Amino acid sequence: MDATAQDKKNTKSAKLTVDGKDVALPVHDGSIGPSVMDIGKLYAQTGMFTYDPGFTSTGSCESKITYIDGDEGVLLYRGYPIEQLAEHGDFLETCYLLLYGELPNPTQKADFDFRVTRHTMVHEQMSRFFQGFRRDAHPMAVMCGSVGALAAFYHDSTDISDPLQRMIASIRMIAKMPTLAAMAYKYNVGQPFVYPKNDLDYATNFLRMCYAVPTEDYKPNPVLAKAMDRIFILHADHEQNASTSTVRLAGSSGANPFACIAAGIACLWGPAHGGANEAALKMLAEIGTVDRIPEFIKRAKDKNDSFRLMGFGHRVYKNYDPRAKLMQKTAHEVLKELGIKDDPLLDVAIELERIALHDEYFIEKKLYPNVDFYSGITLKAMGFPTSMFTVLFAVARTVGWIAQWNEMIEDPNQKIGRPRQLYTGAERRDYVQVDKRK
Ligand code: CMC
């Protein structure tokens, strides 16, 4: 079997030879990035499926939202480089951009900020719903449950064939995630829930809901709020990553949007995905001091040891993750603002990064720090316990999930996601009564 691409200007196709029979596969070009071979009719033409565990060579959809060039370390939201958005924009305009495709003009921005802000409260009954969780539950478990439960509260925005209802559900999700995340935190530490305050910006409001207590006035810190906002921008979308693909797959059956986001949260929780920032910080703490780094580098390179350098490597980036550079800068800004001059974890992180970037193993496998390498240090300095790190990622990624979900529903080629398999189990055999089995 061989496949060869034949460039014929706009009518490209690829030839696949299966058992001596030629099959032409249409090739579609994107605006930038690799073209794709359309294998939609492959089974009908050859009786074969494709096999690609982990989808390393498989495009699952057409999308106009986010572009990554992993070799060059480029990340664009709707065409805009992440560096420009993180430096000059704010999270809510990034949300608008991801949802609507364009940056808002001043009127649109004011209107969008107003709409999100007016949806930040959650149904009062949610606070009673929280009482069902153990206080020591992992906040991601609480988020899976409570976001899924939103489906039981907002029945007026679940007709997914109605664009207006879809947009209301989207705004609700973006608005209520920080409130639920802060409630998960407050519940865990045993403090009263803090209601959102509508005259504050998104990030400041979130920090206040996490850190304000009824006994004291809360003084917002603009540097920390800016850092929080930037962290949200950096994590807002990342094309067809595992959790986004989960949301799309769940949504492809026409499922309730809040339930789809809960599915995304469940997927994000894993240490190979959003859980990596928590795992990276734990790893830095375990390493402890700079002199122990070589021991851990050795372990990471050992094929017989399951240890990996958390916060290193990425399925798509085979270059420095552009978000990691911005995250490193943010980490320094936050530590400076908080007067943390000597953070042993930061010392370990900087030295670990230096050593790994010069090590043949990491160079050869193109393993660079990813966004999670520095986000843990930053969030810890801001006062968040490690268990909250992935929750913050979920708050930020909600807009990406919901923008991709909307795009999927509007896609005329949308079908229920239903992959096939290579079956290697038992062939047909007959049932034997229990008393006759050996
Ligand atoms: N430390 C040591 N070796 C590594 C690492 C690492 N962090 N990551 C990959 N490798 C090696 C791996 O052992 C394999 O070696 P070999 O070819 O000899 O078998 C090779 O590099 C390729 O690894 P892979 O697992 O086939 O690559 P993948 O694309 O399936 O995995 C990854 C990507 C992110 C899951 C992986 O790099 C990893 O586990 N990193 C640590 C966890 C982490 O930081 N995850 C956050 C990702 S960024 C945020 C997000 O998207 O959620």
Image (cartoon, rainbow, N blue to C red):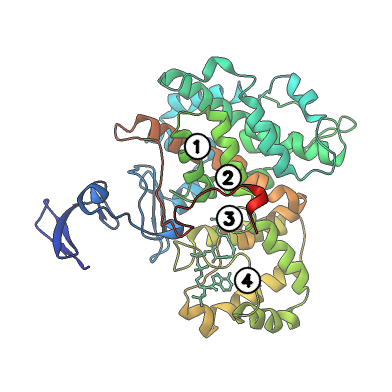
385 with respect to 114 (left or right): right
The residue beneath circle 2 is 232
Mark carried by residue 273: 3
- Ligand 1 positioned in quadrant: bottom right
Of mark 2 and mark 1, the one earlier in the sequence is: 2
In 3D space, how far apart are the residues under numbered discs 4 and 2 (Cα atoms)?
A: 26 Å
Asked whether mark 3 and ligand 1 are closer than 8 Å, the reply comes as yes
7 with respect to 222 (left or right): left
User: Which residue corresponds to the image point at 20% horizontal and 50% vertical from the top-left?
Assistant: 45
Is residue 205 visible to the viewer in this orientation of the structure?
no
Q: Nearer the viewer, mark 2 or mark 1?
A: 1
The residue beneath circle 4 is 308
Of mark 4 and mark 2, the one earlier in the sequence is: 2
Pointers 3 and 4 in contact (C-beta within 8 Å): no
Pointers 4 and 2 in contact (C-beta within 8 Å): no
In 3D space, how far apart are the residues under numbered discs 3 and 1 (Cα atoms)?
A: 18 Å
> Picture coordinates of residue 248 (x, y %)?
46, 39
Mark 1: give few (<14), some (14-19) or many (20+) Cα within 10 Å: many
Quadrant where the C terminus is found in the figure:
bottom right
